[in-house]
Amino acid sequence: MTSMRLVLAGLLIGAAALSAAGPGLAQEQPKELGTFNSWTAWTRNGGSSGLECYISAQPEDWGPREINGSPVRRSPIHFLVINRKALRTSNEVQTLVGYPFHPSQPNASATVDGKSYPLLTDGEAAWLAVAADEPGFVEALKAGAKLVVKGTSQKGNVMSDTYSLSGVTAALGAATKACS
């Protein structure tokens, strides 16, 4: 995993924390470009990486919600596709799953309508294991109906997040236009 991806994970988590902090920090918050069904397009100044344009969604379902009679607690869950104008990067795929992945069981995956892509994990974040798969994965998102992210938590529980892909094409269009 690249150090840029680790920096991005920190920036996105920080942006989420700033969003929750309230209106006093408005100049620090990402700017919403629009919500398109299940997906929202955003821009923000990424500091050294310049303008970042990305889309995000939260799962429509996740589970299990209970293990051994106790509720499962997770931080916010998001799936993102990121473009960074100054770095000329596009279609970087990332998910924040809200639980730490099990470090010795790197069996996380993202599946679009039955086609599975392996994920690299670090803490609560994951990226496509093969960066060269990102353009094809994003095309699969546009053509697909459902995205499922699966992984094993630090406690050994198999977790699953299900996302609707309704609106992903329009959200990607808005983010791409903003970074062009």
Image: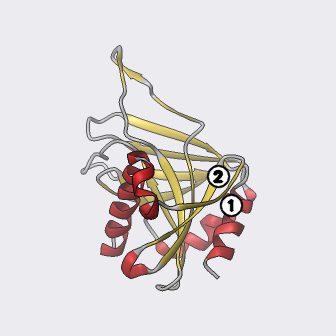
Which quadrant of the figure has residue 20?
top left
For the question of whether residue 167 can be seen, the reply is yes
Q: Residue 84 location, x and y as percent?
A: 50, 77
Residue placed at 37% from the left, 50% from the top? 17
- Going by the numbered disc 2, the residue's amino acid type is Trp
- Label 2: few (<14), some or many (≥20) within 10 Å? many
Position of residue 137 relative to residue 45, above or below, is above
Judge by depth and name the residue closer to the eye, 83 or 117: 83
Judge by depth and name the residue closer to the eye, 72 or 43: 43
For the question of whether residue 107 can be seen, the reply is no
Q: CB of mark 2 within 8 Å of CB of mark 1?
A: yes
Image quarter hosting the C terminus: bottom right
Dot 1 falls on a residue whose secondary structure is: helix
Q: Residue 138 location, x and y as percent?
A: 63, 65
Residue placed at 34% from the left, 42% from the top? 99
Q: Residue 56 location, x and y as percent?
A: 56, 55
Image quarter hosting the N terminus: bottom left
- Label 1: few (<14), some or many (≥20) within 10 Å? many
Image disc number at residue 95 = none
Q: Which of marks 1 and 2 precedes in the sequence?
A: 2
Judge by depth and name the residue closer to the eye, 113 or 13: 13
Residue placed at 73% from the left, 53% from the top? 167
Image disc number at residue 171 = 1
Decide if residue 42 is on the left or right side of residue 104.
right
Decide if residue 119 is on the left or right side of residue 7.
right
Q: Residue 28 location, x and y as percent?
A: 42, 63
Position of residue 60 relative to residue 143, above or below, is above
Residue placed at 32% from the left, 40% from the top? 153
- Going by the numbered disc 1, the residue's amino acid type is Ala
Image disc number at residue 39 = 2
